[in-house]
Amino acid sequence: MDLKTKMMISIIVPCLNEEEVLPLFYQTLEVLIPDLGTEIEYIFVDDGSTDRTLDVLKIYREKNPAVHYISFSRNFGKEAAIYAGLQQASGDLVVVMDADLQDPPSLLLEMKELLDQNPDLDCVGTRRTSREGEPFLRSFCADFFYRFMQKISPVALPSGVRDFRMMRRSVVDAVLELTEYNRFSKGLFAWVGFRTHYLEYPNVERQAGKTSWSFRQLFFYSIEGIVNFSDFPLILAFVAGLSSCFLALVMTLFVVVRTLVLGNPTSGWTSLMAVILFLGGVQLLTIGILGKYISKIYMETKKRPLYLIKEQSES
Ligand code: UDP
Ligand code: MG
């Protein structure tokens, strides 16, 4: 038998309230799959949806044994959903893609082709080259985040990188070994290394439904990314502490000399307040940064499961 026909691709799809777009997603993939020329399995992860997402998935499961679903007991976040999907996936190649068709399914063919033809390539990832259709502030901040990450983190995170990727089993097994609670998938995929080729494509807007990320959530998500993959903020705190010590020394010298030369006039309230406020600010900021890392340690030591399953399709 031809080896190729024995291969299987697992397609992991995290879903949070996607009842509107799922039919379109499923139909598009069903049309495309014969072209892939391999057996596939779908692993839909219902991340605590409050709409009819799970019902839709159950209907697909009844019609198609290649459909598998896992339903969480509540919303655990996309990162947990991806991890659950990776654990369930049994394919030789594994794909992670969004349900909203922002990840162009046609790229799957290109990804598989690349992996077939380059045995030394382990993963094909994707990057957005534009962010058309996105609010300006959002894309500006996202761009800034990637640049900043690149500067401060030892793992290379290409600008605009998406979770959408196709990877070999070796990469999946490596990512599964990272069982940390604070997950930032883009960073984890970069951290495990392996040879990754990035396909580029312009932004595609969500086909239906609406994004579950508010600007506030994205902001905190980017802080997660920074704290999880870099100790730069700690270094910043250290540098701030060091420079304020230096500044304090210079100021002390200045004040002492001035008192010796000019006597001890009681003026100087303004500069005193400025120094107190500045140092107070630096101290609070530093404590805040420390606190962020301590909270990470706290969550890690609890060793809580990353997600809880309410129900899942029988395999
Ligand atoms: N998603 C999820 N859990 C969450 C948030 C999102 O499983 O807590 C899924 C969502 O259903 C979609 C994908 O992650 O398939 C990307 O989400 P979304 O389109 O809302 O994000 P954006 O594309 O705006 O970054
Ligand atoms: Mg989306």
Image (cartoon, helix red, strand yellow):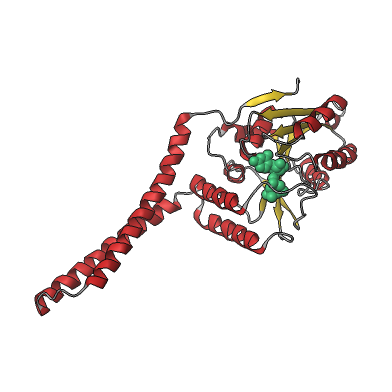
Give the residue furthest to the top. 314
Where's residue 220, x and y in %? 54, 49
Q: Quadrant of residue 37?
A: top right
Q: Nearer the viewer, residue 192 or 208?
A: 208
Residue 190, image x, y percentages: 60, 45
Residue 186, horizontal then vertical, whole percent: 61, 46
Task: Identify the residue at horizontal 90%, vertical 40% (top origin).
Answer: 31
Residue sitting at x 30%, y 60%: 279
Question: Residue furthest toward the front?
Answer: 51
Residue at 67% x, 34% y is 48
Can residue 8 be seen by looking at this rendering? no
- 162 vs 280: above or below: above
Compared to residue 145, the image places residue 255 above or below, namely below
Between 86 and 7, the one lying in front of the other is 86
Q: Quadrant of the C terminus?
A: top right
**Image quarter in which the N terminus is found:** top right
79 left or right of 208 in image: left
For residue 74, above or below residue 213: above
Q: How many marks overall?
A: 0
Q: Residue at x 76, y 48 (%)?
A: 103
- x and y, in percent, of residue 51 in the image: 74, 36
Tell me if I can see residue 198 in this picture: yes
Which image quarter has ligand 1? Answer: top right
Find residue 77 and report its image quarter: top right
